[in-house]
Image (cartoon, coloured by chain):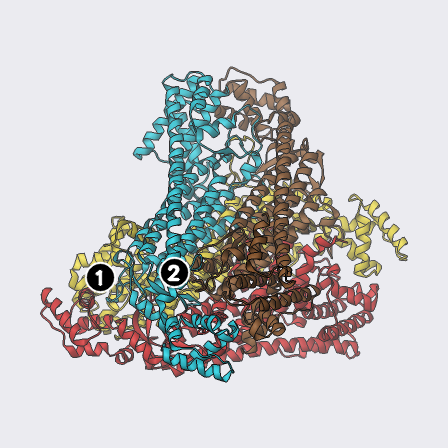
Chain colours: A red, B yellow, C brown, D cyan
Amino acid sequence: MKEKDVEEYLVEEDIELDKKLIVPDIYLMKAHTIMLWKTGYLERKKLVSILRALFKLQRENEKGTFKLKGKFEDVHMNVEQYVINECGLETGGMIQFARSRNDQVIADIRIFLREKLLSISLKLTELLDSLLKLAKENIETVYPLYTHLQPAQPSTIAHWALSYFDYFKRNLDRILETYRRVNLNPMGSAAGSGVELNIDRELTMKLLGFEGIQENTLDVISSRGENEAETLFTLSMLMTGLSRISMDLILYSTSEFQFVRLGENYVTGSSLMPQKKNPDTLEITRGKTGRIYGYLMHVLSTLKDLPSGYSRDMQETKASLFKGIEAVEKALKVFPGLIKTIQINRERMVEACLKGKTFAADIANTLVTKHRLSFREAYMTVKNALEDVEEDAEEITEKINEIMEKTKKKTRVKVEEIREALDIVKSINKRNVLGGPSPESVRRMLVKREKELNKIKKGITLKIEEIRGKMGYLDEIAREIIEGKIKEPTQLIRKLRSHKK
Amino acid sequence: MKEKDVEEYLVEEDIELDKKLIVPDIYLMKAHTIMLWKTGYLERKKLVSILRALFKLQRENEKGTFKLKGKFEDVHMNVEQYVINECGLETGGMIQFARSRNDQVIADIRIFLREKLLSISLKLTELLDSLLKLAKENIETVYPLYTHLQPAQPSTIAHWALSYFDYFKRNLDRILETYRRVNLNPMGSAAGSGVELNIDRELTMKLLGFEGIQENTLDVISSRGENEAETLFTLSMLMTGLSRISMDLILYSTSEFQFVRLGENYVTGSSLMPQKKNPDTLEITRGKTGRIYGYLMHVLSTLKDLPSGYSRDMQETKASLFKGIEAVEKALKVFPGLIKTIQINRERMVEACLKGKTFAADIANTLVTKHRLSFREAYMTVKNALEDVEEDAEEITEKINEIMEKTKKKTRVKVEEIREALDIVKSINKRNVLGGPSPESVRRMLVKREKELNKIKKGITLKIEEIRGKMGYLDEIAREIIEGKIKEPTQLIRKLRSHKK
Amino acid sequence: MKEKDVEEYLVEEDIELDKKLIVPDIYLMKAHTIMLWKTGYLERKKLVSILRALFKLQRENEKGTFKLKGKFEDVHMNVEQYVINECGLETGGMIQFARSRNDQVIADIRIFLREKLLSISLKLTELLDSLLKLAKENIETVYPLYTHLQPAQPSTIAHWALSYFDYFKRNLDRILETYRRVNLNPMGSAAGSGVELNIDRELTMKLLGFEGIQENTLDVISSRGENEAETLFTLSMLMTGLSRISMDLILYSTSEFQFVRLGENYVTGSSLMPQKKNPDTLEITRGKTGRIYGYLMHVLSTLKDLPSGYSRDMQETKASLFKGIEAVEKALKVFPGLIKTIQINRERMVEACLKGKTFAADIANTLVTKHRLSFREAYMTVKNALEDVEEDAEEITEKINEIMEKTKKKTRVKVEEIREALDIVKSINKRNVLGGPSPESVRRMLVKREKELNKIKKGITLKIEEIRGKMGYLDEIAREIIEGKIKEPTQLIRKLRSHKK
Amino acid sequence: MKEKDVEEYLVEEDIELDKKLIVPDIYLMKAHTIMLWKTGYLERKKLVSILRALFKLQRENEKGTFKLKGKFEDVHMNVEQYVINECGLETGGMIQFARSRNDQVIADIRIFLREKLLSISLKLTELLDSLLKLAKENIETVYPLYTHLQPAQPSTIAHWALSYFDYFKRNLDRILETYRRVNLNPMGSAAGSGVELNIDRELTMKLLGFEGIQENTLDVISSRGENEAETLFTLSMLMTGLSRISMDLILYSTSEFQFVRLGENYVTGSSLMPQKKNPDTLEITRGKTGRIYGYLMHVLSTLKDLPSGYSRDMQETKASLFKGIEAVEKALKVFPGLIKTIQINRERMVEACLKGKTFAADIANTLVTKHRLSFREAYMTVKNALEDVEEDAEEITEKINEIMEKTKKKTRVKVEEIREALDIVKSINKRNVLGGPSPESVRRMLVKREKELNKIKKGITLKIEEIRGKMGYLDEIAREIIEGKIKEPTQLIRKLRSHKK
């Protein structure tokens, strides 16, 4: 027995985190002991007794009456202890046969993590939805696209929203790539060199709904932290997107820009200054983004110098993984609503386009296409012409023609040409290049993305149901074993075979 | 013109890095100007003149006589300046029509990066080769697998090597996933809101060998840094593997472990202590791993608060990306040779297994399978029995039976049972679970991985050749335009159509 | 009122953390309202009512019956609400006059943080104590000092322990430097541009025990996160030391090194392998070290792009600061005991010195001092001589003299010279350079460090008492105001003046 | 001899970095060999020969004709090789007696680093100067201080500039604290366990201008990386300040804020959009800030798991340290000029104050001080009153009085009171709290800071001269030895004693 301080140091926070692994561990123990029975290492009678105890534990856990105790170190030993208390040492002492806590905790985390990756993906599709909606409503809402935070060229809010759609869509891809590396069975690896017993890794794979087996047993154990790092990187990128959209909206909602107004639900007053409406939700998002980076850095710097096999340093990665997931989940709960309640100030944005002279490159292009200047000449001409000029077509025309004369060009621009370039709406319509902001181009993108999103949603929902289905199926098998419907391993195998994936 | 200090601050280091983008930028300009001609924005005569200038530049660059100048800021402006000097402002001033440096630099980096991702992948297969070789030669080389750096259970060096094989194989997967997001055409995005011209993004895609188009033009510009972050994360994971294998080998080659000896080429003497052979290559690897983490952290913390569109903060990510790639390339040049020249000390490792009592769990399992104790009982029995005992079968038998008596178990172990558990080689043979270290299991894995690796190598080589082929094809087209074989856009289109992918 | 999800996102975790700020906030409000009275902004009657409420709140908080509520956002608004409930809006609504939550939270955190910095410092002196003790007991315990994890030269465990003493001593210096920048009064800054009232920042400074005032009021608000970053860096360095001492001990306690054995309290068994004693306490320490780095990275990446003045991103730094402090506190509770219970295996270490040929440089030096070879010649001679030789004086002598002959040196070494170099104990005695490992040198260092440590301990204890004294004094003043002993501001001022610092 | 790839991997980049250590290493070798002579390990004749060679090397290095060669690994071996070539093996082979590369590289880095810390400090005082100047010129320049990027309260540009002054002043303190831990003599530590010779660490300390000796010889070697981490943290904080001031100025110079205009020298045009003036200098600064964080993270993650004593992982920290210093040096060259050339748009800022209703809290305070509402009541009254109102005194008065009536307050505000609150200039004058933005308060701060800054500058300049003086003195001694003016160690000692510090 450890001294209090040492127990606290090793266990205290971790056992708090282990709460999230109670359900995974119960399912794991069901599958594992059924496998032990099927491979002949556990008598049917003992299995039945163990399964009953696990179901009982499950109910107590649901009711909240089951508490993890620090003196038993972790969820695995707590579960074992519960089963031993229920069934006696002779029976309960068998549930941890042919495994170690090393493969067990990886399995628990993966059962937990795969579900989280899917639920985050689903939440992310809601954000994608809200961005599509915003885009649809703002196909003709002009705004000045910025580079270096200086007005660059006119674009539309729809185009802006769709750019984030595409960013988050790539995040979805990354999450699902990670998912594929997560949903693999580690059980059977024990402490890394497997076991000298005839156990059946394929059976636990099937019972637990894993899509494959991570084969090399040492690789399994060494890879603790790898799913964690990859997940945290993926979440870092996701949060980076939220942080950047936050940055945009914080700027656009300043009293200097006044492009948008955030929904009342997402701003907060000051305790001192009565006039204030602060974009706290967005600021918290930027703040949380840095936390995820920190968690990633923690996991990486932990993995860097670990020898192969398990070291307890890895335990600490659990906190960073869980905290990272929690932050992202909360952010994704809030963001779709925030996006949907943005109020747009169209006038301010058109005005900002004109003031920011976002038409300059268009004029230069006109000099190229209509007046046969080379681009670099046209650029220099417009640069000089716009130096001290207001957004006035006559004035600009005059200035340009002055320069034309000086540089001995024979051509002269007409005021209508400049007027056309200054017409922001027309300018937008012409930006019809593939992926550009013209209403036509944006509509093409919208149609494509709506279809794609529906397909993605269905895919994720299917996966979620599949996994829930597998867990239900495991319960069903366990119950049939208890009830005597499944008496022989052969019956189990037949049942599994008949189950369509 | 900027003051010297400011120019130095903004440009100096960056233009050094831009050297790697000269070739990509030349190809980019070829494709871009051919596209301008095809879409009617550039006369044939001017195109020919530009293409000649670009070929000339290419030759000068190969000879090393072309130098980037800081006063022109970056590779793009340097290339433009070169072409203007060659063809005059009227012609040369057209090459940067209908693009901006924002889409241009992304295109350059992607052309550079996709090649690096493939060449790193190919180098990585050599490492995989060396691990397979090491595994093949050590199928029966027993060593004590560690957890917590304490001997845990017996395994083999083949199993150990294959565990790293699988780790690096996943890295390969991650690199190729990143590759798919990298090899997309950004051209046509200009500063983010596309252009109001009828340019042809599909054509530049084909000419430059991109596999698709990144559609939304603002998304393209905002995504600078995303490929960088993803690549650096992938490289971080790759280096983490090298760092961990280094850690293992540093330990195994200490004078206390003496499991392995590194090849003379990979150790270094001391300037003070004549007896020393230090594993410098491995230590440098750990050191470089932290650098890649730092580069990743740099890119992430840069992206976090950037508004949409280009900000010059992004320029700085170039250094971190290039440096990270360089470090990994160098490491991968060294490691296959290092792995191949490891000398193994078989006796020391068997000895370490015995001393480390790696047989303890096997004895416990024997008590379960042969003597019907539950696992937890068996575990406690062996734990107590081994407390102050040498690795001696008689002594262990006696101790266990004493405890059996005390705990009122009716069964007694036989000394042969214990002897068998102490026989490390037999123990290994029995660890025949899927993915386990038994020679049989390892041979199964070897066969599978050899096939897989061959397939992967072919795939990567093919991709490399394909991209080189595309660049050659672009040169061919450019030459045919110069030589007058292609006179009309229709001829170009026909040629492209006839080209099988 | 915010939607539940938004409240959860903004407040949930933070209000949990704010528990640690209840006591600081109560004291802050006492000092602040006394100041408001003294400067004429608050009537005596109202002050008395407020102070009574604050004392009542303090008692409830001690009993644990006061709960922070999410709907009031943070500790400050919860405390205000409590006082309003107790005294009515007219009176209670005055406590947040002439401040904002921006200066208030900084004040709360500093009151919390200064105490933590001191208590961590005190804990650190216990670690220093344990290292001194270990050193004293092992002045003559030889071990092979490693470079590159290869035996380099003989040293002693005392020398090793003292090297960590000096490392942690520098950490103490860094903590106390940070402390000086923390213990400054931010109150009066309000939202950053101070207040247009005649308040007295010096008075709150005195009442709250701050050692100075952070003057510029915008600087105060912008500096949120700076104390946090500095503290987390300092703690990162502290943990780095613990991580490295852990690394040493993990290695030294492997079954291959067997230099030390850790106390039973600090090792942990396996759930699978009965033989194991794993150095979990040390591994957890390395794991926690990476977490602190991550927290630091979070704070830095948060600060990087914040404009001046408060942004709510800063709120998130609270979690990282608090978590970092907690981890370090727990580690420091455990480590002194761990160090004190290390058991040393002297024989193994002498043996390792010989096997590692740690005498090689000494032989080379002998060739220099006794045989007038230049160092580089001597080095090369010994390097070649030791190549394939056991640690045998005769053999070494012979080999060296062979080389001497070949290289035409006239001198020859005597076997006694080599024997002397091989005598590890003598070698240690000769390493008497300032700071070297000879017993004489180590004793000198011990004496000096013991004195120094005593002085440091006294200094820290004094500071801790001083701060507690100040808080007690504030309570005393508040009670005297309630009880009518202090009726006029002049009495308050007189009392403060008479109080010796 | 290593294979090319391995040499490249281990040495290539590092030897490039070592260029900066050539001069330090030459001085180190002078001091070290003089010490060897003084302690009797080196004959005078040999010393003279060595010193001559070192002076010659110094001249060649100044002329740029000395090149470091990769095959000799590092600067130390290159210098040794040079001296051997000049003086023969018998003499030159002595320069590395009684040291190792481990203490030598630390000494070199510290000689380099102390100078850099001082020169960075001096550069930083120029930035402080420019901030003082900006403040002096803008004592009455009102601007809206922001919190959450929403206008909060009126302040002045002088106050803003001084807030950064104080921030950077604390950075100066941190640099000088680091300096004190850097400027300590490591020589004599050899590989960590000192030497078994009678060398004189105090003498090398004096000759090299170190202010003390880092005593424990193992601590010295283990501490490689500690100075690096501390420096990089300090530089991270410094850059964080530059990044935040950049963020402010990027915002303030947008076409939406238009508070300031940056000097032409610090903005850059677009290659596509002729109208643009982008704040590239500021953006590059934010980008470089993240790089320094990355370097810090690299060093920390490297140190974390290193056992005591030297490991070659540490070599890699050199690149991060040098690169970090370089970036900061360049930034500090640019920033003072940037600050000095900021053009202020006073009208826009007053306007922004009014539009942002920065007077709201002042009105609330008026309700408290003049109308005896409690602060929370006053706050709620103003909050409701300002909801849909322009910045018009009559309208506001009316609204407030309506609410007063509704909430049954007997008092009524007068329009003059509101008018006064709306008078931004008066409001600023009243913000006269210690550290507040009133002109009076700012002038007090200016006077204090000017004095302080002068003192600091003198202090730093003195330290720089002192160190240069010491190096000159070492040269003088070396020359006197060569010239025979110093023939005996006693003469050396006498000379040193007579030299006032």
Judging by the rendered image, the residue that carries numbered circle 1 is B51
Residue B214 appears anywhere in the view? no
Judging by the rendered image, the residue that carries numbered circle 2 is D438
What x and y, as percent, mark residue A250?
42, 70
Q: Are marks 2 and 1 on the same chain?
A: no
Q: State the quadrant of the C terminus of chain B.
A: bottom left
Query: Tag 2, which secondary structure?
Result: loop
Please determine whether, in this image, residue C190 is positioned above or below residue C406. Answer: below
Of residues A10 and B128, the one nearer the viewer is A10
Q: Residue at x 58, y 57 (%)?
A: C491
The residues bearing labels 2 and 1 have C-alpha atoms spaced at a distance of: 65 Å
Q: Is residue A420 left or right of residue D118?
A: left
Question: Which dot, 2 or 1, sits closer to the camera?
Answer: 2
* Amino acid found under the numbered disc labelled 2: Ser
Q: Chain of mark 2?
A: D
Query: Tag 1, which secondary structure?
Result: helix
Q: Is residue C363 left or right of residue C277?
A: left
What x and y, as percent, mark residue B176?
46, 63
Q: Is residue D226 left or right of residue B72?
A: right
Residue contact between numbered discs 2 and 1, judged by CB atoms under 8 Å: no
Q: Chain of mark 1?
A: B
Within 10 angstroms of label 1, few (less than 14), some, or many (20 or more) residues?
many
**Count of all numbered marks drawn on residues in the image:** 2
Please determine whether, in this image, residue C451 is positioned above or below residue B485. Answer: above
Q: State the quadrant of the N terminus of chain B.
A: bottom left
* Amino acid found under the numbered disc labelled 1: Leu
What x and y, as percent, mark residue C300?
48, 57
Residue C315 appears anywhere in the view? yes
Q: Is residue D163 left or right of residue B55?
A: right
Within 10 angstroms of label 2, few (less than 14), some, or many (20 or more) residues?
many
What x and y, as percent, mark residue D260?
30, 63
Of residues D499 and A37, the one nearer the viewer is D499
